[in-house]
Image (cartoon, helix red, strand yellow):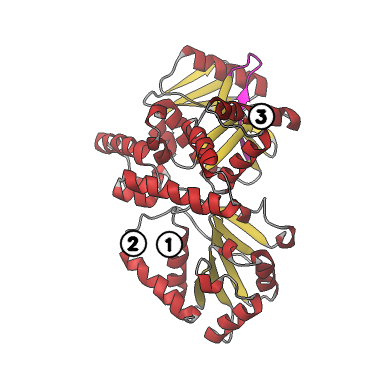
């Protein structure tokens, strides 16, 4: 096995072959373990390698260790620590441990590395098992998760929008973004083959292999049905009925497990109804959102501009989410849906409706929701329309999607 420093330098050499799209994302530094999580191919490894290069250039001690290297998966933690000290006998060492979930007994190993106080530790992986809400109890209080999502629209717009020229250019760029999404490789190549390859990799490596799914074709049917129904309501029993309709018999528990696998692979996100009752929340339909709108292009019959806009908005809300805040959908007393309600410390804070064009019914839904939630302002995101509507004490801001995504509204 090559030395850890040689391995680090080998991977650092790949930086010169990568076309960089600057990310508005900071790893930061902490006495706790910092976990960088998220789907495949969003730039987690590149983010680590750039940080390692910077630290080494500053004369600090750093190593990049990819645990998807077969020779490293079964290395014991004390042996690993000795290998690190062989490279850097003295002083604190920055460790960047990639795909750490592949390391046997990774949670115990990280606790040991953290507790000996010799290392500043960063880890990454493509599994939500590394998220702070799902980590094993032995790591509680030692761990902070940061999620890296596909490129935001603000990250592909590398110019200031000041005149009609830039406004026209940014509108054209939004058309591209709605089609090709934010996976860096896909954005650069504009390749449908890249999208297909990415989905296949997530399908087999992050789900089939990891969860040992036995009936691959049944799972594939569920997956494709869920992806095609992005930004729509789904229920587990409804998914079971769909399978029964195509001649496949599975129980609800299996369907629930399949959806859980998709979530843990960061392939989909689920949004729930806002209600004080946890039971009512669980019984009501969920809304499914896909990790990137490029995957929608694989299902041409599902390409709907309004739903794509809603999916993009949800992903941006995830990027902007603050600590102690959550995202839900809201249903008025009339039974009508408003797409997003953001709560802060459990209290309603921000109301957002997404629609391609503004219609009177949209205003009515938002107005009802404002009154019921006792909120003063709401936002309606449209394709092009822009205005501010004042009705008594309520203010409804109508703003184009591009402007909202760039934080200009």
Stretch in magenta: 326-336
Which residue matches tag 2?
Answer: 18
In this view, 208 is above or below 367: below
Measured as percent of width and height from the top left, residue 261 is found at 59, 45
Labelled pair 2, 1 in contact (Cβ < 8 Å): yes
Q: Is residue 43 part of the magenta span, yes or no? A: no
Q: Residues within 10 Å of mark 2 (few under 14, many from 20)?
A: few
Per the rendering, the mark at residue 274 is 3
The answer to which quarter of the image holds residue 241 is: top right
Q: Tell me how far mark 2 sits from mark 1, CA to CA.
A: 9 Å
Looking at this rendering, what residue extends furthest in the left direction?
165
Q: Is residue 329 magenta?
A: yes
Earlier sequence position, callout 1 versus callout 3: 1
Image position, residue 138 (x, y; %): 74, 62
Q: Residue furthest front?
A: 247
Across and down, in percent, residue 340 comes to: 56, 30
Q: Is residue 382 visible?
A: no
What's the distance in space between the residues labelled 1 and 3, CA to CA? 37 Å
Closest to the camera, between mark 3 and mark 2, is 2
Give the labeled residue for mark 1: 46
Q: Is residue 190 left or right of residue 91?
A: left
Q: Image check: 117 left or right of 173?
A: right
From the top left corner, tell me how far across and down residue 224 is, in percent: 48, 36
């Amino acid at each position: 096995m090559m030395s850890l420093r040689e391995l680090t330098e080998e991977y650092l050499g790949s930086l010169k072959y990568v076309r960089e799209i600057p990310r508005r994302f900071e790893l930061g530094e902490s006495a706790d373990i910092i976990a960088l999580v998220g789907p495949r191919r969003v730039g987690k490894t590149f983010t680590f390698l750039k940080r390692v290069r910077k630290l080494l250039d500053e004369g600090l001690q750093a190593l990049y260790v990819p645990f998807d290297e077969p020779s490293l998966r079964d290395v014991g933690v004390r042996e690993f620590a000795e290998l690190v000290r062989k490279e850097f006998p003295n002083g604190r060492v920055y460790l960047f441990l990639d795909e750490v979930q592949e390391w046997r007994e990774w949670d115990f190993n990280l606790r040991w590395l953290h507790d000996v106080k010799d290392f500043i530790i960063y880890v990454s992986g493509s599994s939500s098992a590394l998220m702070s809400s799902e980590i094993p109890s032995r790591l509680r209080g030692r761990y902070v998760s940061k999620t890296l999502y596909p490129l935001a629209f603000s990250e592909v717009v590398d110019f200031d929008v000041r005149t009609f020229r830039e406004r026209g250019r940014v509108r054209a760029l939004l058309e591209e973004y709605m089609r090709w999404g934010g996976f860096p490789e896909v954005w650069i190549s504009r390749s449908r083959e890249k999208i297909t390859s990415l989905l296949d990799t997530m399908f087999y490596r992050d789900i089939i292999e990891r969860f040992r799914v036995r009936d691959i074709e049944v799972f594939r049917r569920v997956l494709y049905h869920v992806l095609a129904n992005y930004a729509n309501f789904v229920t587990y029993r409804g998914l079971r009925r769909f399978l029964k309709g195509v001649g496949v018999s599975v129980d609800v528990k299996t369907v629930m497990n399949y959806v859980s696998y998709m979530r843990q692979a960061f392939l989909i996100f689920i949004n729930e109804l806002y209600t004080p009752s946890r039971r009512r929340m669980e019984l009501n339909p969920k809304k499914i959102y896909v990790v990137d709108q490029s995957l929608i292009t694989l299902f041409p019959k599902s390409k709907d501009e309004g739903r794509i806009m809603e999916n993009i908005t949800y992903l941006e809300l995830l990027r902007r989410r603050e600590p102690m805040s959550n995202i839900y959908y809201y249903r008025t007393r009339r039974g009508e849906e408003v797409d997003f309600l953001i709560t802060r410390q459990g209290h309603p804070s921000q109301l957002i409706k997404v629609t391609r064009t503004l219609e009177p019914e949209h205003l009515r839904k938002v107005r009802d929701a404002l009154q019921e939630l006792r909120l003063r302002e709401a936002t309606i995101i449209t394709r092009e329309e822009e205005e501010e509507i004042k009705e008594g004490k309520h203010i409804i801001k109508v703003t184009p999607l591009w402007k909202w995504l760039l934080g200009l509204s």
